[in-house]
Image (cartoon, rainbow, N blue to C red):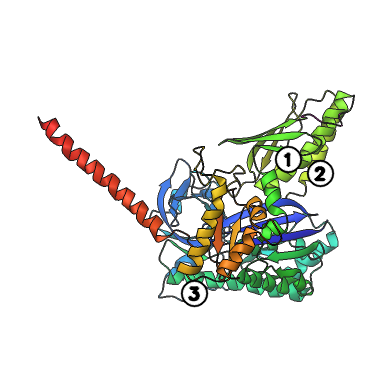
Amino acid sequence: MRSELIVDVSATEVAIALVEDSRLVSLQKESRSVSYSVGDIYLAKVKKLMPGLNAAFVNVGYEKDAFLHYLDLGPNFASYLDAVNQALDKKKKLPEITKAKSLPEIDKHGSIGDLLAPGQQLLVQIVKEPISSKGPRLTTQISYTGRNMVLIPFGNKISVSTKITSAAEKQRLSKVIEAIKPENFSVIIRTSAEGKKVAELNHELRELTGRWEDTLAKARKSDAPAPVYEEAGRAVGVLRDIFKPDTFEAIHVNDADTHRQILSYVNLIAPEKADIVKLYDKPEPIFDSFGITRQIKTSFGKTVSFRSGAYIIIEHTEALHVIDVNSGNRARATADQESNALEVNLRAADEIARQLRLRDMGGIIVVDFIDMTQAEHRQKLYEHMREIMALDRARHNILPLSKFGLMQITRQRVRPDLEIETSEQCPSCAGKGTVPSSLLFTDTLRSKLDYCINDLGKTNFIMYVHPYVEAYIKKGLFNSLYRTWRKEFGNKFKIMADQSLAYLQYRVVGSDKQEIDLREEKDISSSATKTKRKVKTRSSDGDSQTPASES
């Protein structure tokens, strides 16, 4: 299976698409101004204790207080708290935990009130991003994730991934880490460490311990609440978790800075694969060029079709997700109803597994498959679902079909589900149902070109329009509107198609890749005049009504 990563960096967000054999299997979007991501570390302040929940609400700077449960303090909380207090005391040196004496582990069944107090400062790490009306979830058991290992300050344990099946390799890795690991650090050896040399593992271990030291130094200079360590950018984070040099064919990025970050990371872990990181610099939107936009339009939405007319319906609620499987008007239905149901259910299972990854759906998922009477068919469907879900990196649990034909799945949720609206609201009428004549739309585009070139003095910019509009503008070899406008205004612009735009929508991007504001002064002034006129009308109406009410 060949994989490609397509990274679309815009002014407002970063979108990362993972493609396997040209099929979209994962899509992640993140605002460029987002914070409170999983793995970020904050200097925070305890706001309120909740003895009934055995937890505390903590201020990390988010609009909702974050949640810290007693069990998320970690067994080595006493050693952790001693080091944090020393780090925040500017009269003392920064703590060297390799030389510190380990304190006894806290009671597993203790009370939060015995360890924390309102106003107390802590170093906390985000383990679950804000979802719906809930704030982030925290832990004080700090960890730093690398390509081959996870470093946890305080403790002396070494754990090896259960996915490494060779007992000899497990023993080798444990001995290597034991020899190079600093005191008072625990290490979890990841699957990707299999077969790695000592020098490579030692280099990564020193880098991770350096991150811990940098975190303490930054915390000393900060005032709570404040971020003191941020995980690598989402693109690098995704790459770190899924990158396999032998299966990745290419990584395409349309932003120079992000390209540099990814190239640096690939050079670090697999320098022989550095040439697969490619900077995309064509004017056509990168998702359009690789067919991602079309797959997004067909894959997100309430109804998703797959093979031979069959489809699934996905409904989201606050508590769970419900998926209904329908055979539809299948053209190749077999004469045997039971075999037909099994075939549809197996193909639906493939699509459902893809949708769970694609939308990052978490929590409880209930699937209503087509009823099957034979027990061996129900068992075959259950085993097939377990097999294809094995590719999903998120923790999950699958139960066999119930007597009602329902399958229950639980899937780890650490981020909000990805929801993309595939229907388009008309940009001209804002959903009211009436629009100006589409034939006059080209006049609007021409006036905007005139405004950009003659009023704003812009050159070498690109105007993006819907593909149908672009085809209409460029229709004709010698007498197209495009050639006419280029003769009138000069070769100072290009018109390109963008599949993500609605029919009568457009946008203009300058040579610096920043979007140009197309609101002209007359538009702003006319809008302001209308607002003033409304205010004046309301005030005059109020003045005329006052004497009447008094009389």
Q: Is residue 239 left or right of residue 384?
A: left
Q: Mark 3 falls on what kind of element?
A: loop
Q: Which mark is residue 423?
A: none
Taking the spot 58% from the left edge, 35% from the top edge, the residue there is 317
Q: Return the disc, 1 or 2, that comes first in the chain's sequence.
A: 1
Q: Which comes before the other along the chain, label 1 or label 3?
A: 3
Outermost residue to the left: 551
Tell me the quarter of the image containing the C terminus.
top left
Nearer-N-terminus badge (2/3): 3
Residue at figure coordinates x 51%, y 46% from the top left: 428
Q: Amino acid at mark 3?
A: Leu
The three-letter code of the residue at mark 1 reads: Ile
Residue at 74 percent across and 35 percent down: it is: 311
At x 65%, y 74%, the residue is: 206
Query: In the image shown, does 309 or 100 lie closer to the viewer?
Result: 309
Label 3 crowding class (10 Å Cα cut-off): few <14, some 14-19, many 20+? Answer: some
Residue 149 spot, x, y in % from top left: 69, 64
Q: Nearer the viewer, mark 1 or mark 3?
A: 1
Residue 119 locus on image (x, y percent): 38, 57
> Could you tell me how far apart the alpha carbons at marks 2 and 3 are, in whole angstroms?
49 Å
Give me the disc on residue 387.
2
Quickly name the residue at label 3: 94
The boundaries of the magenta stretch are: 328-333
Q: Nearer the viewer, residue 21 or 266?
A: 21
Main structural element of the magenta stretch: helix, strand or loop?
A: loop
Q: Nearer the viewer, residue 183 or 36?
A: 36
User: Magenta stretch containing residue 298, yes or no?
Assistant: no
User: Quarter-wise, where is residue 368 in the image?
Assistant: top right
> Which residue position holds label 1?
352
Q: Is residue 277 above or below residue 376?
A: below
Q: Could you tell me if residue 98 is visible in this image?
A: no
Looking at the rendered structure, the kind of residue marked 2 is Glu
